Amino acid sequence: MKNLLTTAAAVAIAASAAQAQDVTLRIQTHYASEHPSGQLAAMFIDDVQTMSGGEIAIEMFYSSSVVATTETFDAAINGILDCDMTGGAYQTGKNPAFQFVGDIMGGYDTPWQQISWLYYGGGYDAAQELYNSQNMQLIGWWLYGQESLSSSKPLAGPEDLKGWKFRSPPGLETEIFTELGATPIVMDFTEIFTALETGIIDGADASGLYNNVGLGLYDIVKHATYPGFHSMPSDHLACNKDIWDGLSEKHRRIIDTAMQKLTLHTALSNEKKNAEAAAELTAKGVTLYNWSEKDRADFRKAAQKAWDGWAAKTPEAAALVASHREYLSALGLVAK
């Protein structure tokens, strides 16, 4: 009898272990595996697999190798993938509210402030309602900090934006800069270099300072804003809600913890790289402009005017704008 019980227990334990090891998450990111962010994603994978003792396996698809970047979210909803590791801003066509979990534009000064909205400003619950309405679960963000504008002309303050022609992504940003007198021209990321060389544009909103150096922009133009103030995109990890709810509490905690580590190291590593790039560019004669608090406040006012237009589009957008405003006010970045 004892042997039978022992055997039954062993079978049960083995079955439980087999079931635990069956967790495989298929995730897609738009970053290449050799890109710094792709390397950080690899760290995230290793953390999850190591902390789970091999119970969770992650199959990462880099460079949007399964579906187009903009289709990653839908692929997770429909079960082609389990999770999306791109960004919420790609989903504004579903609901304009996704702009305010993807790139708030003219909101926070630092990645730490923006992350604190998510965890300590009511942002996580507010954003979760939006994600859950699509049967998705927001796990967390990884954001590298403020982007820098690159220009062939000085950009010392808002006055210099008047008549400034620059490459812009579509949507909210075009409205904000048009309000300030600039001429945003929507074009693909790959067209920036040639457009700057030929003078079609005076400058570009491309990426952070370090990434802009890698793109070779400062071989052509000699002015940039740093630290930035206008744009701070948040990449996300979002999973199919049925998949997420089906994980054990232990596994959810492991993934959440690894994601928070990824968040920290993404911001830290890019802060260091941007500072090194700033020193290198200054030595080479590139002029960097750190806008004053007043100039930043003026930009934020123009941004909020555009926010109001987007807030009127859906109740979810209105709720997120209200949440950001309340927290920005608590931080002293906007007046009540």
Image: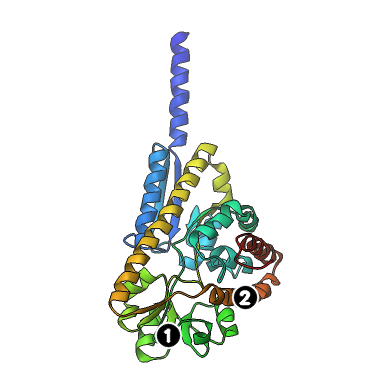
The residue identified by callout 1 is 154
Pointers 2 and 1 in contact (C-beta within 8 Å): no
Q: Residue at x 50, y 66 (%)?
A: 233
In this rendering, is residue 182 above or below 240?
below
Q: Residue 288 is drawn in which quadrant?
A: bottom left
Give the side of residue 328 with respect to residue 16, left or right: right
Q: Residue at x 44, y 39 (%)?
A: 22
165 and 102: which is toward the camera: 165
Q: Earlier in the sequence, mark 2 or mark 1?
A: 1
Q: Which amino acid, by three-letter code, is at mark 2?
A: Lys
Q: Residue at x 46, y 84 (%)?
A: 166
The residue identified by callout 2 is 301
Give the side of residue 112 with respect to residue 286, left or right: right
Q: SS class of the residue under badge 2? A: helix
Please tell me how many numbered marks the rendered image carries.
2
Q: Residue 289 is drawn in which quadrant?
A: bottom left
**Where does residue 57 sit, x and y in percent of width and height?**
41, 44
33 and 61: which is toward the camera: 33
In this rendering, is residue 42 above or below 315?
above
Q: Which amino acid, by three-letter code, is at mark 1?
A: Pro
53 and 321: which is toward the camera: 321
Q: Which mark identifies residue 140?
A: none
Q: SS class of the residue under badge 1? A: loop
Q: Quadrant of the C terminus?
A: bottom right
> Can residue 183 be seen in the rendering of this structure?
no
Local packing at callout 2 (Cα closer than 10 Å; few below 14, some 14-19, many 20+) is: some
**Where does residue 90 sit, x and y in percent of width and height?**
53, 68
Give the side of residue 329 with respect to residue 174, left or right: right
Q: Residue at x 46, y 35 (%)?
A: 20
